[in-house]
Image: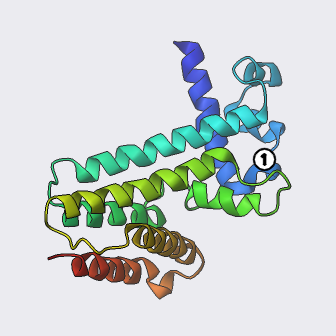
Amino acid sequence: MKGNLTKQRIISKGLALFNRYGIKGTSLSDLMAATQLEKGGIYRHFSSKEEILDGSIRYYISLIEERLAKVTDGVAHPRDRIIRIIESFIQIAENPVVPGGCFIMNLAVDSDFDDSGTHPLVLLSFKRWERLFVSEIQNGIKKGIFREDINVKDFAALAICSIEGSIVLAGVYPKMSSSRVVLNHLTSVVDSFLL
């Protein structure tokens, strides 16, 4: 039990550090200081910094999925479910899971400067997000609530790009109210899907 708690503490502290300083900018000494563990204490649970990063990404994804489950619980109408999902993602700017914005987006940007490319779990996360929007819209089409001619992948791309952009702008230029603008725009797009 104590080992699991220590492992979770390393992942949680690693998540905050990776989100703030990036992959290369987070050192083992940073992890040691944040967790108050010696090098051996960290390596007892993880074989490398990359393994801690993997655990941090998986943990972040699980936290986002918990948020989504809470906001969509008991919501049956496809339009309302999609709006709740959009609102939940946009809330990352105002009520972040971890300080510093969207961890997945930050890692994607961080990988632009890394020769190894985008982390596979980052790509997986964006694909899961895309599938979520596609699935919700297809469910609305199947139920006869949405039009059949919707390009679901285009909407998913528009939603993801808009939401991520609003999160970034909220951090650097909060007076723009980008979150509210994006929410209103995406809501009008979803409403245009209704029969």
Q: Position of residue 145 (x, y in %)?
A: 14, 67
The coloring applied to the image is: rainbow
Q: Residues within 10 Å of mark 1 (few under 14, many from 20)?
A: some
Res 143 → quadrant:
bottom left
The residue depicted at 52 percent of the width and 72 percent of the height is 161
Residue bearing mark 1 = 26
Residue kind at label 1, given as amino acid type? Thr
| Residue furthest right in the image | 115
Image-based side of 76 in relation to 62, left or right = left
Res 191 → quadrant:
bottom left
Numbered marks: total: 1
Q: Position of residue 170 (x, y in %)?
A: 52, 75
| Residue furthest front in the image | 149
Task: Pick whichever, 190 or 134, lies toward us.
Answer: 134
Secondary structure beneath dot 1 equals: loop
Q: Quadrant of the C terminus?
A: bottom left
Q: Where is residue 87 in the image (x, y as percent from the top left)?
A: 33, 66
The residue depicted at 75 percent of the width and 58 percent of the height is 111
Task: Pick whichever, 171 or 85, lies toward us.
Answer: 85
Q: Position of residue 61 (x, y in %)?
A: 50, 45
Q: Can residue 176 be seen in this view?
A: yes
The residue depicted at 14 percent of the width and 54 percent of the height is 76
The residue depicted at 43 percent of the width and 83 percent of the height is 177
Res 83 → quadrant:
bottom left
Location of residue 109 with respect to 62 vertically, above or below: below
Task: Pick whichever, 20 or 80, lies toward us.
Answer: 80
Q: Is residue 98 visible?
A: no
| Residue furthest top in the image | 1
